[in-house]
Image (cartoon, rainbow, N blue to C red):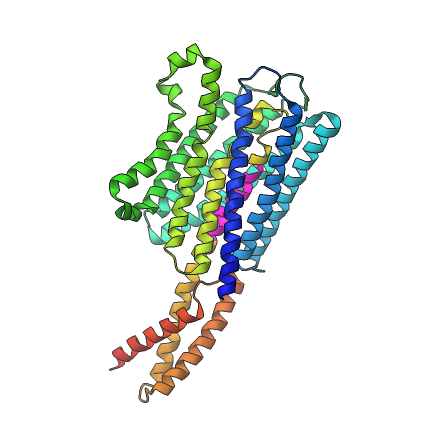
Amino acid sequence: MHQHNTRTNAYGKIVFVSLCIAIGAIIIDTSIVKVYRFITTPVSLDRDIATFIVIAIVYAVVQYILLRSVRTETGNSEHFTQNLPHKIVSIIQYVLVALLVFVILQMLVNQAYNIAIIAIATTISYGLTIVMTGLLALRFFSWFESTKNTVVLPYTLAAVALSINAIFTLVYVVQVLRGVSYIVRPHIGHIGQVGLTPYSDILNSGYIITSIVSFLITWIATILLLRHYSKKIGIAKYWILVTIPLVYFLSQFQPIFLNLFSDYRMSNPILFDVLYTVIFNLSKPIGGILFGVAFWIAARSVHNRPVKDYLRISGYGLLLLFASNQATVLINSPYPPFGMAAVSFVGLSSYLIYIGIYSSAASVAQDIKLRKSIRDSVERQLDLLRNIGTAQMEKEIMKKVLNVTKTMSVEISEQTGVEPSLEEQDISDYVDEVIKETRQTMK
C-alpha cells in the first residue's frame, strides 16, 4: 500500500508539472498571434515554425499523460459509462494530434496549409466541449433538484454558460474561416486575410458576452465553494485573493466602457497594444487557476483517495479549459497556425471536468449506499442473535458483513464504473459503530 501511494504521488507530480508546461505553451501559443497583429516588420518564419512544432509536441505529450492519468485514477474501469467515453475522447485527441502533424507537413512540403484542417480541428474539439459541458449541466441540474444546494446551482449555470460560449465560439470561428482556403507562407508578417461576413459582428458579440457571463458565474460558484476557507485566512484576505482574478479579467474590457489609457494609446499605439495584449492574455489562465484551486482545496479536505483524485482531475480540467478556450485567435489566419494546439486542449479539458465531477459524485453516492447496506446487514444479524450477544458472535457478524460488503462494492463498481472510496478499515470501523448503536437500542 505504501509503495502504491508513493508511485501515485510521484505520478501526480508528473501530471502537475506537465500541466504547468502545457499552460505555458498555451500562453505562448495564443500570445504570438495577438502580438503579431501589431507587427509589420519582417520576422523569422523558420523560427516560428520550429516554435509551433515544439508547442505541438508539448500538446501531444501532455494530452497522453492526462488521458493516462484519468485512466489510472478511475481504476482502469471496463464499465460502459467510464470506458466507452474514455476511448472516444482518446480517439478524438489522437485525431487532433494527426491533424497537427498534417498541418506541419503541409508547411514543410508545400509552404502553405489548408485552412479547412484548422476548421475541422476546431469543430472536433469544441464539439466535444459542447457535449461534455451539456452533460455536466444535466448532471448538476439533477443534483440540484434533489439537494437544493446553493453551490450546485451556480455550477449548473456555469456549465450551461460554458456550453453556450463554446457554441458561439465554434460558429463564429468556423464561419470566418470558411472565407479562406489556403494560407501561403508570407514574405512579411504572419497574418492572413480573414473571411468576415455580415454575421461576424453578431457572433463576436455573442462570444464576448458569453465569455464574460461564463467567467462570472464560475467565479460565483468558486467563491461559494471556498467560502468556508475564508475563516482560516481571514475574510478580508480571502476576498482580496478571490477578487483579484475577477478584476484582472474584467479590466481587459475597460476600453469599451471607460478607455482609461486613451492618452497613452494615442501617443504610442503599437507599444500600448502589444503590452496590453500580453498582460491581459493571462487573465483567463489566472482565473482558471482560481477555479482549479477551489477543487484542489476541496480535495485536500477529503481523506478518501479515489474522491481526492477525482476532484483533482476536475481542477486540472478547469485550469486547462479557461487557459485554452481562445479559438478566436485562429480567425487571424496566422502562419504558422498558432492557436491550433491551444484549441486542441479545449475538448480534453472539458472531459477532465466532467469525468472528475461525475466520478467523485458517483463514488460518494456509492459510499452512502454501502453504509446503508452495512447497517441493514448488521441489524439483521444482531436481531437474530440478540439473546446471545457474545463477543465471538460480534466477530462472526463482522466477518459476514465484510464479505457481503466487499461483494456489493464490486457489484456497484461494475454497474457504475466508479471505484468506491470506502476502504476495508473504513468498513470495519463503521461496522463497529453500527454494532454499538444497535446494541444500545436493543437494551
Determine if the magenta segment contains residue 294.
no
Nearest to the observer: residue 150 or residue 285: 285
Residue name at image x 40 percent, y 79 percent: 398
Q: Is 211 on the left-hand or right-hand side of 226? A: right
Residue farthest along the right direction in this orientation: 109
Question: Which secondary structure class fits the magenta region best?
Answer: helix
Specify the quadrant of the image occupied by residue 257: top left
Q: Position of residue 84 (x, y in %)?
A: 59, 53
> Which region of the structure is painted magenta?
344-358
Q: Quadrant of the C terminus?
A: bottom left
Left or right: 183 in relation to 436: right
Q: Is residue 17 above or below residue 184?
A: below
Q: Residue at x 37, y 72 (%)?
A: 429
In which quadrant of the rendered view does residue 161 lie? Answer: top left
Percent x, y of residue 353? 48, 46
Residue 418 appears in view: no
Name the residue at 55% across, 17% down.
Answer: 39
| Numbered circles on residues, count | 0
Residue farthest to the bottom, as pictured: 388
Determine if residue 264 is in view: yes
Specify whether 145 is left or right of 269.
Answer: left
Instruction: Please say whether residue 355 is one of the residues in the magenta stretch.
Output: yes
